[in-house]
Image: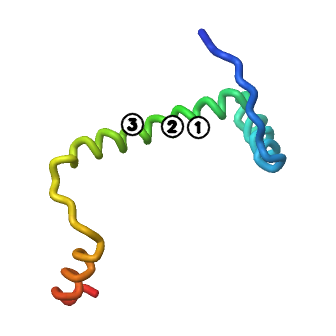
Amino acid sequence: MEDSKRATVYFDASVHQALRLKAAATDQSISDLVNDAVKLALAEDAEDLVAFDQRKTQRSISFESLVRDLRKRGRI
């Protein structure tokens, strides 16, 4: 890992055991597994932000209005 930074992270014992087992089974380090998981979570957050930005001009509707409309149309 080029230009990596060190951090201390505390895991539940069962999570740590699962990470150790997966690391051994996949011939990766725990650090690599955690880095991959964090990158995936950040990428998903970035996708969500793009989707929110694309929808910011859409008209919003309250939950109550949606339910009323669904009932009126016989959907629920």
> Callout 2: 10 Å neighbours few (<14), some, many (20+)?
few
The residue identified by callout 1 is 37
Please say if the residues under marks 3 and 1 sit with CB atoms less than 8 Å apart.
no
Residue 5 in the image: state x and y as whole percent.
65, 16
Mark sitting earlier along the chain (3/2) = 2
Q: CA distance from mark 3 to mark 1?
A: 14 Å
Nearest the viewer among 60 and 10 is: 60
Q: CA distance from mark 3 to mark 2?
A: 10 Å
Which numbered tag is attached to residue 40? 2
The residue identified by callout 3 is 46
Q: Reply above or below: 54 against 5.
A: below
Residue 24 in the image: state x and y as whole percent.
78, 35
Left/right of residue 14 with respect to residue 48 in the rendered view = right
> Callout 3: 10 Å neighbours few (<14), some, many (20+)?
few
In what quadrant of the picture does the C terminus appear?
bottom left
Secondary structure under the numbered disc 3 in the rendered image: helix
Q: Residue at x 27, y 80 (%)?
A: 67
Please say if the residues under marks 2 and 1 sit with CB atoms less than 8 Å apart.
yes
Q: Amino acid at mark 3?
A: Ala
Residue 15 in the image: state x and y as whole percent.
76, 47
Q: Amino acid at mark 1?
A: Ala
Q: CA distance from mark 2 to mark 1?
A: 5 Å
**Which mark is in front, 3 or 1?**
3
**Which mark is in front, 3 or 2?**
3
Secondary structure under the numbered disc 2 in the rendered image: helix
Q: Amino acid at mark 2?
A: Leu
Q: Reply above or below: 56 against 35.
A: below
Quarter of the image for residue 32 reads top right
